[in-house]
Amino acid sequence: MKRCSKCRVAKLVEDFSRNRAMRDGRQNQCRGCQRANRQANAERLRKQRHEYYQANAERIRESQREYHKANLERIREYRQANAERIRNQRHEYYQANAERIREQKRRWYQVNPERRREYDREWRQGNPEKVRAQVQRRRARKLAAYVEDVDPAAILVRDNGECQICVLLVFTGETDGYHELAPHIDHVIPLDPAHGGTHEPANVRLAHAYCNIVKGTGTDADVPGSLAAVRAASSGE
């Protein structure tokens, strides 16, 4: 047992946060008192953290880089084991701080336009599937279609790596620009208002880039001749 220096209540040792600087390795105040203190002094503590970071920014960043390099595997395992919880925490944080985050990004972009353009170029080159997914979501929203997250990698696995139009395998290797057998995400029911399709896993399927382009914005029933040509061309008939 250990007595809290704030509320003076004797509690289990586990009710005190760890602190290697203390003789017994635990904080003097219990977790409940520490939480109440943080809530009562939130603004002052936030200001202190901001001032400390501003005064020690480079040292903090260097320390973080060194820790990350030394614990890369451990960090990766933790993130994989807690992926859902981390995703929810990030979403909740963004929802609560959306305007502040957007303002910080705007200021950074204004101060670092070249770095942003270079970063964007590198990211697009390294993440072609994510770029395509972003374009599809943006297009779906413009067409006022229902939108859910669609993971191209998950669709690739779900459809066994086969184009669902011509039923031949897609090419998943590296390409230098357009490749007619590269994986595309095809909307079974098109997104345009005339068809009323949705952007969600249930309405998308894996397709070759070539097959998807030939199919265009129609349904399978709308373009049977084109799809027949696709299947014939893809199978070499």
Image (cartoon, helix red, strand yellow):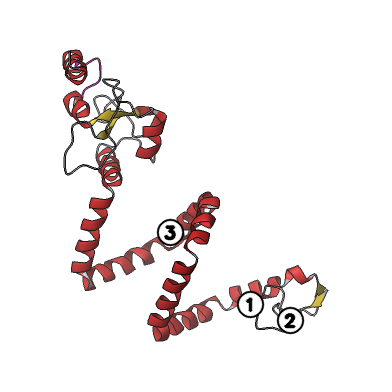
Label 3: state its secondary structure.
Answer: helix
Q: CA distance from mark 2 to mark 1?
A: 10 Å
Q: Is 37 placed left or right of 75 in the picture?
A: right
The residue nearer to you, when weighing 214 against 25, is 25
Say which residue appears at 24% left-offset and 14% top-offset: 221
Rendering coords of residue 197 (x, y %): 31, 28
Q: Amino acid at mark 3?
A: Tyr
Q: Which residue is mark 3?
A: 94
Determine contact: label 1, label 3, CB under 8 Å: no
Q: Residue at x 72, y 73 (%)?
A: 16
Question: Is residue 221 located in the magenta-colored stretch of the structure?
Answer: yes
Residue 150 visible: no
Q: Is residue 223 visible?
A: yes
Q: Amino acid at mark 1?
A: Asn
Q: Is residue 220 left or right of residue 177?
A: right
Q: Which residue is mark 1?
A: 37
Q: Nearer the viewer, residue 230 or 73?
A: 73
What amino acid is found at the position of numbered circle 2 in the picture? Lys
Identify the residue at horizontal 37%, vertical 39% (top origin). Answer: 153
Label 1 crowd (10 A; few <14 / some 14-19 / many >=20): few
- Picture quadrant where residue 10 is located: bottom right
Contact flag, marks 2 and 1 (Cβ < 8 Å): yes
For label 2, the residue is 6
Residue 127 position within the rendered picture, expressed as x and y whole percent measured from the top left: 28, 49
User: What predominant SS class does the magenta segment belong to?
Assistant: loop
Q: Which residues are magenta?
A: 217-223
Residue 115 is left or right of residue 25, and the answer is left
User: Is residue 160 or residue 224 the one in the foreground?
Assistant: 160
- Image quadrant occupied by the C terminus: top left
User: Looking at the image, is mark 1 or mark 3 earlier in the sequence?
Assistant: 1
| Position of the N terminus by quadrant | bottom right
